[in-house]
């Protein structure tokens, strides 16, 4: 299995809803990432987990809450979002064979629309 | 100022033409990625380079670390190559996949 699987592919939610995005990989990768991508812009890093621990939080608002229940799963819990949070949310993983450059495997993304 | 610059921003080619996309960066890096993104879709990692040249099918990527420059070439382009191609670098100062991305090059290949 060489894929990163993200669900759902599309999500529409109101500003008062609570929802979650899920990401799964079975490649044995020990680093997992959440990126946010607005239209016609490059991805922006949100969070990095390494060995199931949060390594990087790029000053993301608390209405986004990541969770890494085990080495294969990464969730992004969403609560009280704003319309400007509408974007493509990409999950990625990498093997962490050595510090620094690792090939990232990206998922297909979850397209979020906040009404 | 973005530390990763790509050119051109947009490119239209006819099927069969040779395509080159350039990437220049200003920081020391441990590696450089070329990524492909189809409209509305996820990202596929095409290459990771730290030196020299790599080839996969009709795609060739080269990097010159001294000149801080990389190129992605598509030979015998096909309409299915239409996508955004993104250059991203691993700065030496960052350890955890904090890629710095270029703005992307929109490639359209017409039949």
Image (cartoon, coloured by chain):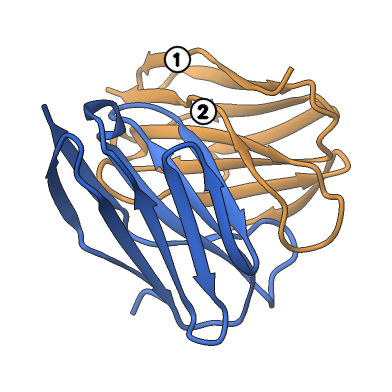
Q: Is residue A35 left or right of residue B95?
A: left
Give the quadrant of the C terminus of chain B.
top left
Q: Residue at x 64, y 43 (%)?
A: A104
Residues at discs 2 and 1 both on one chain: yes
Chain coloured blue here: B
Work out whether residue B36 can be spotted. Answer: yes
Q: Residue at the spot x=47%, y=36% of the render?
A: B43
Q: Secondary structure at mark 1?
A: loop
Quarter that holds the N terminus of chain B: bottom left
Residue at image point 28% right, 26% down: B80
What shade has chain A been given?
Answer: orange
Residue neighbourhood size for the residue with mark 1, other residues' Cα within 10 Å, grouped as few (<14), some (14–19), many (≥20): some
Marker disc for residue A76: none
Residue B77 placement, left or right of B59? left
Residue A53 position in % (x across, y down): 84, 44
Residue receiving disc 2: A79
Left/right of residue B59 with respect to residue B103 in the rendered view? right
Residue B14 in picture, x, y percent from top left: 11, 39
Q: Please report, as a chain letter, where disc 2 is located.
A: A
Q: For the point 69% across and 38% down, which residue is it?
A: A93
Residue B60: give x, y in percent of width and height: 46, 51
Q: Secondary structure at mark 2?
A: strand
Left or right placement of residue B103 versus residue A78 in this view = left
């Amino acid at each position: 299995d060489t894929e990163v699987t993200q669900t759902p592919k599309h999500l529409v939610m109101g500003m008062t809803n609570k929802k979650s995005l899920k990401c799964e990989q079975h490649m044995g990768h020990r680093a997992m990432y959440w990126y946010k991508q607005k239209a016609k812009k490059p991805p922006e890093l949100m969070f990095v987990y390494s060995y199931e621990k949060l390594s990087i939080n790029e000053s993301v608002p608390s209405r986004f809450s990541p969770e890494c229940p085990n080495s294969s799963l990464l969730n992004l819990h969403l609560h009280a979002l704003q319309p400007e949070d509408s974007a493509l949310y990409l999950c990625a993983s990498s093997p962490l064979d050595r510090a620094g450059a690792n090939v990232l495997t990206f998922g297909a993304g979850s397209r979020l629309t906040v009404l | 100022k973005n530390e990763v610059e790509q050119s051109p921003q947009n490119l239209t080619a006819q099927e069969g033409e040779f395509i080159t996309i350039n990437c220049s960066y200003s920081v020391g890096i441990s590696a450089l990625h070329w990524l492909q993104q189809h409209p509305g879709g996820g990202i596929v990692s095409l290459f990771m380079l730290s030196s020299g040249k790599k080839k996969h099918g009709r795609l060739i990527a080269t990097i010159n670390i001294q000149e801080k420059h990389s190129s992605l070439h598509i030979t015998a382009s096909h309409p299915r190559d239409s996508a955004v191609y993104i250059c991203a670098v691993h700065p030496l100062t960052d350890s955890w996949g904090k890629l710095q991305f270029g703005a992307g090059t929109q490639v359209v290949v017409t039949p």
